[in-house]
Image: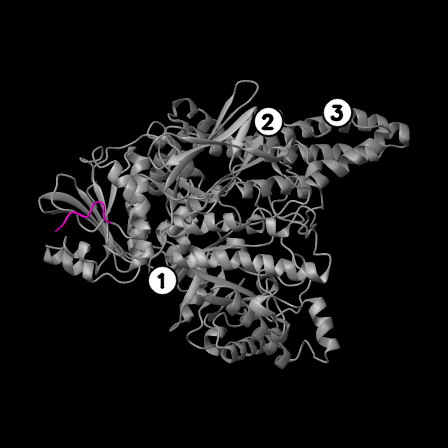
Amino acid sequence: MPNRTCVFTLPLLALALAACSTGRQARNFPVIVAPAGGSFEEVLAAKEIRRYYYLRTGRPLRLVEGLPAAGESGLIVVGGKARPEVSALLADPALKAEVQGLKAEEYRLKTVRYEGRPCLLVAGGDQTGTLYGAYRLAEHLGVRFYLHGDEVPDSQIAAGLPEVDETGRPLFALRGIQPFHDFPEGPDWWDLDGYKAVLSQLPKLRMNFFGLHTYPQGHAGPEPTVWIGLPEDLGPDSTVAFSYPARHFTTLSGTWGYQPEKTSDYAFGADALYERDAYGADYMEGMAPWPAAPADCNALFERFGKLLREAFSFAHRLGVRTCVGTETPLVVPEALAARLKKLGLDPADSTVTRRLYEGIFRRIMENYLLDYYWFWTPENWTWQGATPGQVKATLADLAAARAAAENVKAPFTLATCGWVLGPQSDRALFDKALPREMPLSCINREVGMEPVEPGFASVSGRPKWAIPWLEDDPALIIPQLWAGRMRRDAADALAYGCTGLMGIHWRTRILGPNVSALAQAAWDQTGWNSGSSGAHTDSAAEARPRDLPSADFYADWALQQFGPEVAEPAARIFTSLDGHLPRPSTWVGGPGGLAPDSLAWEETQKQYAFVDDLAGLRAEVRGAGNLERFDYWLNSFRYLRAVARINYLRRNFTLALEKAKTGRDAVEKKRLARELALPLRIELAAAVTQAQAWLMASVSTSGGLGTLANWQQHLLPDLLTRPGEELARLLGEALPEAALPPREYSGPPRLLVPVVRTSVSYGEILKLKVIFIGEMPETAVVRWRPLGQGSFAEIPLERLARGVYAAGLGPEATSDDLEYYIQALTSEGDTLRFPAAAPDLNQTVVVLPLSGE
């Protein structure tokens, strides 16, 4: 076979130049072989293997198209099962049968020999399976994937071929996530880069589903995810001629217990982390708290529609199915209902409902790619149950939607979801009433405290999707470790015959173990699922523990997170906490609330001995990246303990304040306030300041920025602001400075990048948003170069506002796979870098193939 080392089609042209220029250096290292004329996903798989090999070994391997002539180097052959490059390695009849028998999304990893040299086969049952195999190989190299990004150990390995023998077959046809809109901790604060960053992680986790819910008119809505209107209200190119006020969360919104507030009024120095007073996703800029005029209402739907168009097209290229939907029965926004009445139409008429669904579906068809549209049963069905009249109305609504989908020839599949699978009278009711092609799904009840709905066992002959909670919103401000719970829910879903397994969530990084455990359990349950954990009755489900064992999971997780020096004791700590982490937060007027604790602190703090145990390991951690990850969790746990202390001190202060108010007259009230309440208020303010310091030390994503907003706008008003005003009235004077939350941040300087893209399109501008906490830098630059090649170019960061800076790496950088790091120098001589292990281990970005099937 001719040597094709330097012969490439367009998608590989840029890599060809690098491969040819480094051929002599890499001669004794493996060569990555992509199929001739490979598809988008096959070429991406080869490029990703090249990238992760470089991160783990420091060697930029050659990437060639087609099998090269005989040589000394080993080969990593990547492609679908029908590719000739793959077939050439299938001399073993048993291996040939295995590879040829692969189904869609399945993969085979196998170390073999070809023409006397070692080869690693990465074969897929289809294009997506090939990509999954590439990412699974990266995991064998020590890389781990999460929603917030990739995590790579500091220590490097030899650039040889690992001995691998693995077949991957998913246990569920659909596997993915359901990010929930409504709070700033979640996708409400994702812009297009945020969506693409998360979507690019899904195939790495071997996930293939991304679904969104849309709140109707009410506490949080209407939201702009799904436009509701008549077909005649659609303009050209999916524009809308009539709409209504809609929104996603901004700091001026005032929903779910969050008080509207400008970010410039934030305490503890948190104001520096936001470049706008009305902070939110970029498509909400100028729209807070609501769009002001009819043209603005239309513009918001256009902005978010464009985001979904680009994001969902990106998802489809990666093999990810997309889903949006509304609650059922359809809630008609007030402005739309008024317009319908003016037109002589009754919003409650089923014919009008069908026309509205026709409008919804037509706009989706013209605007973005969609695989599923789901209808959510309302939340009160889980707390209050559903009346016969409500069930009847829901069935009529679904019938109208089905008729509308048929009329417009909707290319997507209709499905159900919601807080329950069906009404309490018959959880499988929809199975009897709806066509077999419609998937049925629901999230776990009791915000995930309940296991997977046993009613799934009574549903057969159709797709059915279980959706566990990766976290719950009552404790949204604190860590939640649920790897064992994810295993339990995945095992139950498998036993009930579910064909889909998705996780509902808001945040990303803090959910790393939960996301990883759920993703793994969608492919392999050997070793921890004996087959008896699934159940088919409510009573049997209640008899089993909520969490399955997770020691093996955390043994691997801690090793890759923190390094071998502390892996074993750290794993023991996390294993002991999984499913048992203290919860000093609950729903109080909104997500992640605080409630006074009546226990003595001497007793409560015993629950947090693990914090000091973990801190005792810190001196043994080696490597800047390992230490950054260790400190993230250590500071998160320190923050958790500080929240518990706040609850204790708050109770004492509240009791003292109430005591002061019982004084006989103003003089005695003032005395009691000064003697009893003020010292406790000072102690409480100090505890809150300490909690914020630990929180600021761990913020690293947009979800962390949302948690800060929760404190400033939901928690502090009732915790410090209003009680402080009451105390000042009793004292007859302003509170001393020690009793007030400080305006400034007093901790060490930090640099964070809240959204990390790991892939870009050819020539796309890679936008970098960089936030500095504490002292602003004297100099701040981005240094980049083609992956593993040459010297670094340098561009300065530009200050947008406050502590927020930005830079863009343009077509010169994004014409080829690249690496970069950010470096800043403060006036005090501190050097700040992202990633933490830079410049030894930089952030890498793969440039997506230019073409392909």
Element marked by disc 3: helix
> Where is the C terminus found, in terms of image quarters?
bottom left
Q: Residue 173 got which mark?
A: 1
Judging depth in this view, the residue of 446 and 249 nearest the camera is 249
Q: Does the magenta stretch include residue 5?
A: yes
Seen from the viewer's position, the closer of residues 726 and 741 is: 741
Instruction: Where is residue 467? Give x, y as percent.
Output: 46, 58
Determine the image quadrant of residue 814.
Answer: top left
* Left or right: 14, with 94 as reference point: right
Relative depth, front residue between 160 and 814: 814
What amino acid is labelled 2 in the image? Met
The Cα–Cα distance between marks 2 and 3, rounded to whole angstroms, is 25 Å
In the displayed orientation, state which residue is furthest to the top: 828
Q: Do the residues labelled 1 and 2 touch (CB within 8 Å)?
A: no
Report, in whole angstroms, how far the alpha carbon at label 1 lies from the one at label 2: 49 Å
Residue 696 against residue 111 in the figure, above or below: above
Which element is circle 1 on? loop
Rendered residue at 87%/28% (across/down)? 668
- Could you say which disc has been placed on residue 776 in the image? 2
Closer-to-camera residue (474/201): 201
State the residue at coordinates (73%, 76%): 341
